[in-house]
Image (tube, grey):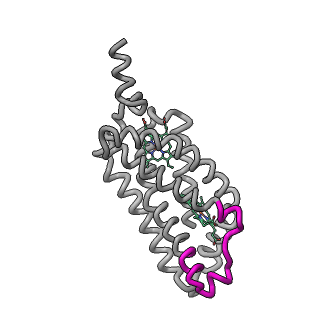
């Protein structure tokens, strides 16, 4: 369900990139920050499954590990996710050389991330939709273990995402006002001035 929930905001992020990320920077930053709580829940829930599987909890062992291709891609996907979001946030907080590094990382990380995200979503979309339907409709009114907690967790991440996006609006200028040529390094600017 968290995966399905991510599809809309990620499509909006993609839209800002295709239409010109600097023109739509405010929306890009709002949606990017709002995505952080649901992405953390996604990482936590898959991390939980990972931990339960390797500590040999019966139900998780029975469910089995993901197919081998997805198992190999998963660590790269998790690292790309962390680098993408951390570099995005860092651009609004850091200065000097650290800011240059964050700007250099964000673009390439987003390319790797979008490719892995597309593969992941294509492979899992059907399973995610069926699972979500079962959780919402098929289990309605019945007492299914953990369903209420999962519902609260999902609602809480959506609300925290919106709060994170909205609360950072007053600080958005830190991201929006980045100089467009800065990521090539200050020395590039100096070279222009020298010429
Ligand atoms: C930030 C984006 C996402 C991250 C970091 C992420 C991460 C992961 C990881 C690490 C796994 C376990 C390894 C694997 O099976 O490949 C996983 C499983 C899964 N993901 Fe995602 N995912 C993301 C987005 C999505 C989206 C958009 C969907 C839905 C289209 C989705 C649906 C699933 C499903 C159905 C599973 C398998 C669960 C199971 O077998 O019980 N994920 N995800
Ligand atoms: C799904 C998540 C995200 C994707 C796919 C994404 C993708 C991109 C891409 C492709 C660019 C253009 C890179 C370039 O011109 O070199 C960009 C720029 C930018 N993004 Fe993101 N981004 C994401 C999340 C975030 C987040 C969470 C933030 C921060 C709150 C953020 C802030 C920025 C900023 C400030 C720029 C301008 C960078 C610059 O001028 O060097 N992004 N993003």
Numbered circles on residues, count:
0
What is the x, y in percent for residue 19?
Answer: 54, 34
The residue shown at (54%, 65%) is: 2
User: Magenta region: which residues?
Assistant: 49-72
What is the x, y in percent for residue 1?
Answer: 57, 67
What is the x, y in percent for residue 88?
Answer: 42, 47
Location of residue 75 (image quadrant): bottom right
Q: Is residue 139 above or below residue 105?
A: below
Q: Nearest the camera: 23 or 40?
A: 40
Residue 157 shown left or right of residue 77 in the figure = left
The residue shown at (58%, 86%) is: 57
Majority SS type along the magenta span? helix
Q: Quadrant of ligand 1?
A: bottom right
The residue shown at (34%, 44%) is: 92
Residue 49 shown left or right of residue 191 in the figure = right
Q: Nearest the camera: 84 or 195?
A: 195
Q: Residue at the top extreme?
A: 195
Q: In which quarter of the image is the C terminus?
A: top left
Q: Does the magenta stretch include residue 63?
A: yes
Location of residue 122 (image quadrant): bottom right
Location of residue 23 (image quadrant): top left
Q: Does the magenta stretch include residue 51?
A: yes
């Amino acid at each position: 369900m968290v995966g399905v929930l991510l599809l809309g905001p990620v499509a909006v992020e993609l839209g800002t990139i295709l239409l010109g990320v600097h023109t739509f920077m405010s929306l890009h930053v709002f949606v990017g920050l709002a995505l952080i709580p649901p992405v953390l829940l996604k990482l936590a829930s898959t991390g939980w499954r990972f931990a339960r599987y390797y500590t040999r909890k019966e139900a998780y062992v029975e469910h089995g590990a993901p197919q081998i291709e997805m198992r190999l891609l998963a660590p790269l996907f998790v690292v790309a996710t962390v680098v993408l979001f951390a570099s995005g946030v860092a651009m609004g907080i850091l200065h000097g050389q650290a800011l240059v590094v964050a700007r250099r990382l964000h673009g390439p990380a987003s390319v790797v991330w979008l490719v892995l995200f597309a593969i992941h979503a294509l492979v899992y979309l059907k399973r995610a939709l069926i699972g979500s339907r079962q959780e919402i409709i098929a289990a309605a009114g019945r007492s299914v273990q953990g369903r209420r907690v999962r519902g609260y967790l999902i609602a809480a991440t959506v609300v925290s995402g919106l709060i994170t996006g909205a609360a950072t609006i007053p600080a958005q200028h830190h991201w929006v006002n980045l100089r467009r040529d800065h990521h090539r390094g200050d020395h590039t600017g100096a070279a222009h001035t020298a010429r």
